[in-house]
Amino acid sequence: MIRYDLICDKGHAFDGWFSDSEAFEKQTKRGFVECTQCGSSKVEKQLMAPRVGTKANRKSDAKPQRMAAVPADPRMAQMMAMMREMRRHVEENAENVGDKFADEARKIHYGESEERGIFGNATADEAMSLIEEGIEVLPLPRLPEERN
């Protein structure tokens, strides 16, 4: 994994973790990387100082540090709490159909399967196809802890 210091076109700084530099480029081009403060998808890497670990600067008695993403803006913290609550509600009250989401949504829409709340995974193309067919779908918010 690689961590980048990022900045949006409005000057908000934040960071993001990616499997490699190619993953960052692909996600940015597709508009998947968004500012944590304003939601802008016009994001670029900032100049970063390299972090190099050596034996000389390690402490053998040091305890591992836990990192937590804590929004500086209280409105952002409130928004994150709301997103977590929405996510929890869906997971407790709907069926997870996994990668069969698009197929199951169609079956429900066309009366081939019982009507119920479902959630799962769909590609962007599958989601667009569902919307074009008049099937209502909404993305669940991605939470920072899911990206670890």
Image (cartoon, rainbow, N blue to C red):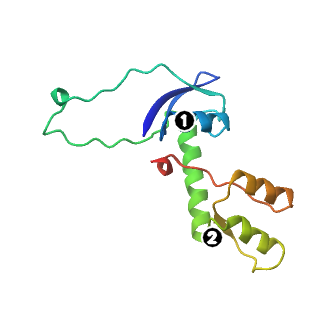
Q: Quadrant of the N terminus?
A: top left
Number of numbered discs on residues: 2
Tell me the element at label 2.
Answer: strand
Provide the residue designation for mark 1. 22
Q: Nearer the viewer, residue 21 or 93?
A: 21
* Horizontal side, residue 19 vs residue 37: left or right: left
Residue 86 position in % (x across, y down): 61, 57
* Horizontal side, residue 73 vs residue 148: left or right: right
- The residue depicted at 59 percent of the width and 58 percent of the height is 87
Asked whether residue 33 is in view, the answer is no
How many residues crowd around disc 1 within 10 Å: few (fewer than 14), some, or many (20 or more)? few
- Residue 67 occupies which quadrant of the picture? top left
Residue 9 position in % (x across, y down): 64, 23
Residue 130 position in % (x across, y down): 80, 60
- The residue depicted at 53 percent of the width and 42 percent of the height is 77
How many residues crowd around disc 2 within 10 Å: few (fewer than 14), some, or many (20 or more)? some
- Amino acid under disc 1: Glu
- The residue depicted at 66 percent of the width and 28 percent of the height is 42
Tell me the element at label 1.
Answer: helix
**Residue 97: assigned label:** 2
* Horizontal side, residue 107 vs residue 5: left or right: right
Q: Nearer the viewer, residue 91 or 16?
A: 16
CA gap, disc 2 to disc 1? 30 Å
- Residue 112 occupies which quadrant of the picture? bottom right
